[in-house]
Image (cartoon, helix red, strand yellow):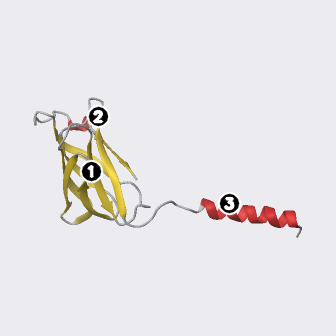
């Protein structure tokens, strides 16, 4: 094999190996943000589903509490409350940040005056690594 052929083969192997990197792995967290076209609620009750959930913790400006659903370790009921105006945020602690992002449904929500939001389905929960 010529020197040029060896170089090209080496580049091809490097490209294949580099493409196999799936990103970060191991314990960590995903951050959830509750959003809607009309702004974030002051508080919400959510159902969060995901692989390897270890717990729920607060994120900047919010308090969050969570517990696994009985018989479903991958499903957590979460209560998140804003302590200051702004986005409603929380963290989902997981065993492996290389896993798929969790999904969530807003079951109930309240506005800044602590009044129930009539249609909590307008809220979305977006997760990021």
Answer with the quarter of the image where residue 16 lies: bottom right
CB contact under 8 Å: marks 3 and 2: no
- Marks 1/2: CA distance? 18 Å
Percent across and percent down for residue 27 are: 37, 66
**Residue at x 61%, y 59% (from the top left corner):** 19
Closer to the N terminus: mark 3 or mark 1?
Answer: 3
**Residue at x 15%, y 33% (from the top left corner):** 118
Q: Residues within 10 Å of mark 3 (few under 14, many from 20)?
A: few
In this view, 124 is above or below 32: above
Mark 2, secondary structure of its residue: loop
Answer with the quarter of the image where residue 25 lies: bottom left
**Residue at x 11%, y 33% (from the top left corner):** 113
Percent across and percent down for residue 37 are: 30, 30
Name, please, the residue furthest toward the top.
38
- Badge 1 is on which residue? 59
- Marks 3/2: CA distance? 41 Å
- Badge 3 is on which residue? 15
Q: Residues within 10 Å of mark 2 (few under 14, many from 20)?
A: few
Count of numbered circles on the image: 3
Q: Which numbered mark, 1 or 2, is in the foreground of this view?
A: 1
Closer to the N terminus: mark 1 or mark 2?
Answer: 2
- Badge 2 is on which residue? 36
Q: Quadrant of the N terminus?
A: bottom right
Mark 1, secondary structure of its residue: loop
In this view, 81 is above or below 95: above
Closer to the N terminus: mark 3 or mark 2?
Answer: 3
- Marks 3/1: CA distance? 38 Å
Percent across and percent down for residue 13 are: 71, 65
């Amino acid at each position: 094999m010529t020197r040029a052929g060896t170089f090209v083969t080496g580049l091809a192997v490097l490209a294949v190996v580099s493409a196999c990197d799936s990103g970060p792995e191991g314990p960590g967290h995903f951050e959830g943000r509750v959003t809607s076209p009309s702004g974030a609620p002051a508080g919400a009750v959510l159902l969060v589903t995901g692989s390897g959930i270890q717990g729920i913790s607060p994120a900047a400006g919010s308090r969050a509490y969570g517990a696994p659903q009985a018989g479903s370790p991958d499903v957590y009921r979460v209560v998140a409350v804003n302590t200051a105006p702004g986005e409603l945020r929380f963290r989902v602690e997981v065993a492996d940040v290389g896993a798929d992002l969790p999904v969530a449904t807003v079951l109930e929500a309240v506005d800044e005056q602590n009044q129930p939001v009539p249609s909590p389905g307008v809220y979305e929960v977006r997760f990021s690594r």
